[in-house]
Image (tube, rainbow, N blue to C red):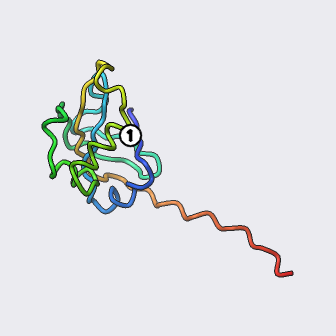
Amino acid sequence: MMQLFFKKQFHAAIRDGTKRTTIRRWPKAHVTAGGNSYAPGLGWLRIEGVEQVELSQLGEEDARSDGFDSHASLLRTLNQLYPDHLTDGKQWFRIAFSMHEPIAPRAPKAKAQQPLF
């Protein structure tokens, strides 16, 4: 079972269904359409589709479905996450998913109470 890890900033968007895709850089696809993948902190995701893509194919709709406000923001983030993508010999994959079996979000840790005096 391949786990899919997401930055915490995307958890709410995944839970509410506004983030429905993720772009990953792998030597080969690590998940398959119709399967499930566990996302720590979120629960089980249903993998709806897996497609090999090129960065030049991605547009504004890809950015929005991936939780970004613009195509430029998506590309900037992908370049930061995968700085060696031009020479690493791997491929880009667009993974479409939906929440299958969510887990309850963790409550924020309570701050230690300061003494009153």
Q: Element type at marker 1?
A: loop
Residue at 62% x, 63% y is 109
Depth check: 108 or 75 in front? 75
Residue 82 image-quadrant placement: top left
Quadrant where the C terminus sits is: bottom right
- Give the total number of marks visible in the rendering: 1
Q: Amino acid at mark 1?
A: Leu
* Residue occupying the far bottom of the picture: 116
Residue at 40% x, 42% y is 38
Question: Would you place residue 27 above or below residue 21 in this image?
Answer: above
Residue at 38% x, 54% y is 10
Residue 103 horizontal side relative to residue 46, left or right: right
Question: Would you place residue 29 above or below residue 16 in this image?
Answer: above
Depth check: 69 or 51 in front? 69
Residue 36 horizontal side relative to residue 54, left or right: right
Where does residue 12 sit, x and y in percent of width and height?
38, 61
Where does residue 81 sit, x and y in percent of width and height?
38, 37
Label 1 Cα neighbours within 10 Å, binned few <14 / some 14-19 / many ≥20? some
* Residue occupying the far right of the picture: 117
Depth check: 5 or 67 in front? 67
Where does residue 26 sit, x and y in percent of width and height?
31, 27
Residue at 18% x, 48% y is 62
Where does residue 64 sit, x and y in percent of width and height?
21, 55
Q: Which residue is mark 1?
A: 4
Depth check: 21 or 91 in front? 91
Quadrant where the N terminus sits is: top left
